[in-house]
Amino acid sequence: MDCLFCKIIAGEIPSRKVYEDETVLAFHDIAPQTPVHVIVIPKQHISCAAEINEDNSAVVAHIFEVIAKVAKELGLENGYRIINNCGEDGGQTVKHLHFHILGGKKLSEGLVK
Ligand code: AMP
Ligand code: ZN
C-alpha cells in the first residue's frame, strides 16, 4: 500500500519516535508547527476518522491513553491541543488516521479557539 505512515511503521521511512507499542506509534512531525509537534497513529491502517467503527475503535481509545502519557513525557504539563484533520475539507494530507499533539507554547491563534 502506498501510504507514508505505513512506511514509517514498517521502518522504510525514518522517523524520530517518541513512543511505540504493539498497536500505536508516535513520532515528531517533520515540519513542526509548534515547539512540540508529535503525530500519533495506529499501526493498523485506518484511512481517516470517518473510517472509525466498532471493530477498530479500541485502538483509538488507546491512542488517547498514549497521548496523555506522551504529553507528560514531553513536558506539556501546561496543556496542549489535539488535532485530527479528516478528509479533503478537513485538510488531511496523509490518508492514515493520525492525531497531532501541538504544544510547547500558548496556542491562541487559529481554529477552535
Ligand atoms: P495532515 O495534514 O493532518 O494530514 O498532517 C500530515 C502531517 O504529516 C503534516 O503535519 C506533515 O508535516 C507530517 N509529515 C509528512 N511527512 C512526514 C514524515 N516523513 N515524518 C513525519 N511527519 C511527516
Ligand atoms: Zn497507512
Image (cartoon, rainbow, N blue to C red):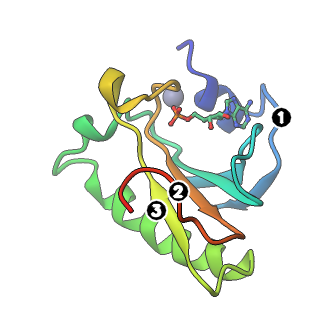
Q: In which quarter of the image is the C terminus?
A: bottom left
> For the residue marked with disc 3, what is the amino acid?
Ile
Label 1 CB less than 8 angstroms from ligand 1 = yes
Q: Residue furthest bottom?
A: 77
Tell me the crowding category of disc 2: few under 14, some 14 to 19, or many 20 or more residues within 10 angstroms, Cα based: few
Residue 87 quadrant: top left
Determine whether 50 is above or below 39 in the image: above
The residue under the point 59% across, 78% down is 69
Residue closest to the eye, 29 or 97: 29
- The image quadrant of residue 34 is bottom right
Q: Residue at x 31, y 25 (%)?
A: 89
Residue 36 x, y percent position in the rendering: 73, 61
Q: SS for tag 1?
A: loop
- Which is more toward the observer, 35 or 47? 35
86 sits left or right of 9 in the view: left
- Alpha carbons under labels 3 and 2: distance apart: 26 Å
Compared to residue 74, the image places residue 63 above or below, namely: above
Look at mark 3 in the image and give the residue it sits on: 63
Q: Give residue 11's position: percent from left, percent from top.
A: 77, 34
- Earlier along the polypeptide chain: callout 1 or callout 2? 1
Answer whether labels 1 and 2 touch (C-beta < 8 Å): no
Q: Which numbered tag is attached to residue 14?
A: 1
Disc 2 target residue: 109
Residue type marked 1: Pro
Task: Tell me which residue sits at (61%, 31%) in the image.
Answer: 5
Query: Secondary structure under badge 3?
Result: helix
